[in-house]
Image (cartoon, rainbow, N blue to C red):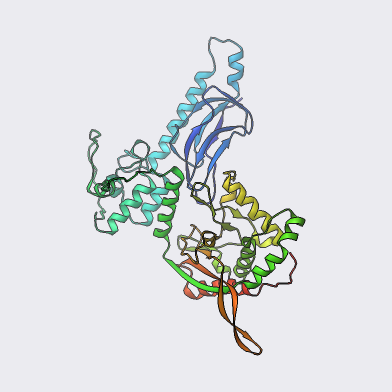
């Protein structure tokens, strides 16, 4: 039977590579169909990779810590090895597997050379090359960046740091590529990296806390988003008194009938979905010079983890769900997010994101767009305030439940008119909540 290549799976939209965290199996170990072989990580989630075929791991092609492109072979699984080990033979089949593995490794190296620099001395991931192309970073400049990744590889963090310094004038852009003879590897510090690698002065009592891997990925993603999209934020204040009174009235019966606690989040999501239907150009992404208008409304909801990090599970096709369905989805995804039980598909494919800064008793926030989306809305804390109410008998001042809404949007494609109108429409749906409605 032929050997089987276990490849790096695609973990979601816009993800071109993943990092191998840990191999769960070793070379020579038997694996069963759908059994996890290794753990990988992207900038969105950690996940285990199962094998679709049983057999024996003949060859592991990448080490722990390696960054592997999506679709590249990461291991060879052979079903012949089990038979060969059971029947002694002077010429075992293992050498054939070794030859096949060597050929695969050579093919991978060959592919890597096609995206290498002109000297073939370094490998640049597709993500790094895309950033370089978008920021007009020449290959000569890439060669000058000392990478902090595995075997000196230039990471996304390295190239973004270089771009920051180039914009601030610390380094100058170059268009000329100098080809020189190979030199002995000597660790040097270029002027560009001298600033980023210089240590901050420590004071008595200071404590150094290293970022965990997830925090580093979040930091990279946030910096990338600010580099990609010119952010603009609009605000409105909404009277959500009817929402507060309705939820207070139905929450006990709702939990008794549905077995779920109803929070304000599914109520907010329902209003957001209605507004997206009214303004579909909020539900888009940018691909180069093209605008991708999304058919599905996949709504991400930012969830805080016990570690203090943030993750965004996605409610797929939120526009097809009623309030009960939204409540069940919100509770299920939120609980599994806090217990690190989300699947990769459940945190990818979002088209719009909602974050609740009111959960931290903040009145408003200016959230950063979750790429490749073009808008993210934040809901603040609900506060009782005196407000002017228009009645048929004239204006009166009453105590109302008020809440600020904020919308950060990508000004490349969302103008103030669209962003402001959309946000106001969300507020209108909240204020028009029917206090006598059913679930």
Residue at x 54% of width, y 22% of height: 28
Q: Which residue extends farthest right?
A: 257
Give x and y (percent) for residue 394: 62, 89
The one of 14 and 358 positioned closer to us in this rendering: 358
**Vertical relation: 404 (above or below) 313:** below
Q: Is residue 137 visible?
A: no
Residue shown at 59%/16% (left/top)? 84
Q: For residue 319, what is the image quadrant?
A: bottom right
The answer to whether residue 160 is above or below residue 72 is below
- Give the total of numbered labels: 0
Check the image and report above or below for 393 versus 174: below
* Along the viewing direction, whichever of 185 and 150 lies nearer the viewer: 150
Q: Residue at x 48, y 27 (%)?
A: 101
Q: Please identify the quarter of the rendering in which residue 116 is found.
A: top left
Image coordinates for residue 123, horizontal then vertical, percent: 37, 40
Q: Is residue 244 left or right of residue 169?
A: right
Residue in view at x 47 percent, y 68 percent: 413
Residue 231 shows in the view: yes
Q: Does residue 84 lie above or below 230 as drawn? A: above
Percent from the top left, x then y, of residue 230? Answer: 41, 65
Q: Nearer the viewer, residue 430 or 222?
A: 430
Across and down, in percent, residue 216 comes to: 42, 47
Where, quadrant-wise, is the N terminus in this rendering?
top right
Classify residue 17 as left or right of residue 271: left
Question: 21 or 152: nearer the eye?
Answer: 21
């Amino acid at each position: 039977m032929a050997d089987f290549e276990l490849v790096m799976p695609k973990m979601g939209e816009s993800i071109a590579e993943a990092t191998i965290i840990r191999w769960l199996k070793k070379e020579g170990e038997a694996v069963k169909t759908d059994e996890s072989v290794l753990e990988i990580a992207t900038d969105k989630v950690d996940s285990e990779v199962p094998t679709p075929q049983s057999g024996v791991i003949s060859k592991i092609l990448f080490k722990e810590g390696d960054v592997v492109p999506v679709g590249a072979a990461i291991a060879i699984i052979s079903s012949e090895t089990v038979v060969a080990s059971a029947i002694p033979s002077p010429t075992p089949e293992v050498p054939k597997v070794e030859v096949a593995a060597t050929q695969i490794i050579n093919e991978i190296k060959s592919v890597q050379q096609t995206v290498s620099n002109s000297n073939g001395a370094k490998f640049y991931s597709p993500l790094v090359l895309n950033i370089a192309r978008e920021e007009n970073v020449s290959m000569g400049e890439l060669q000058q960046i000392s990478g902090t990744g595995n075997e000196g590889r230039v990471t996304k963090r390295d190239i973004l740091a270089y771009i920051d310094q180039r914009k601030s004038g610390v380094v100058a852009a170059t268009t000329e590529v100098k080809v020189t003879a190979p030199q002995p590897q000597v660790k040097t510090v270029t002027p560009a990296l001298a600033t980023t690698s210089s240590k901050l002065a420590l004071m008595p009592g200071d404590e150094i806390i290293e970022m965990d891997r997830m925090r580093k990925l979040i930091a990279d993603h946030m910096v990338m988003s600010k580099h990609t999209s010119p952010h603009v934020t609009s605000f409105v204040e909404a009277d959500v008194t009817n929402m507060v009174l309705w939820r207070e009235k139905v929450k006990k019966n709702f939990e008794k009938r549905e077995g779920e606690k109803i929070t304000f989040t599914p109520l907010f999501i329902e209003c957001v979905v209605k507004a997206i239907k009214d303004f579909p150009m909020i539900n888009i992404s940018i691909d180069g010079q093209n605008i991708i208008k999304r058919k599905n409304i996949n709504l991400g909801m930012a969830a805080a983890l016990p570690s203090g990090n943030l993750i965004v599970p996605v409610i797929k096709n939120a526009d097809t769900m009623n309030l009960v369905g939204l409540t069940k989805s919100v509770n299920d995804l939120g609980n599994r997010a806090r217990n690190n039980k989300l699947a990769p598909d459940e945190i990818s494919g979002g088209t719009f994101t909602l974050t609740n800064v009111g959960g931290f008793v903040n009145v408003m926030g200016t959230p950063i767009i979750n790429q490749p989306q073009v808008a993210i809305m934040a809901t603040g804390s609900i506060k009782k305030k005196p407000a002017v109410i228009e009645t048929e008998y004239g204006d009166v001042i009453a105590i109302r439940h008020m809440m600020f809404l904020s919308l950060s949007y990508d000004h490349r494609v969302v103008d103030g008119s669209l962003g402001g109108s959309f946000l106001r429409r969300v507020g209108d749906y909240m204020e028009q909540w029917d206090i006598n409605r059913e679930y």
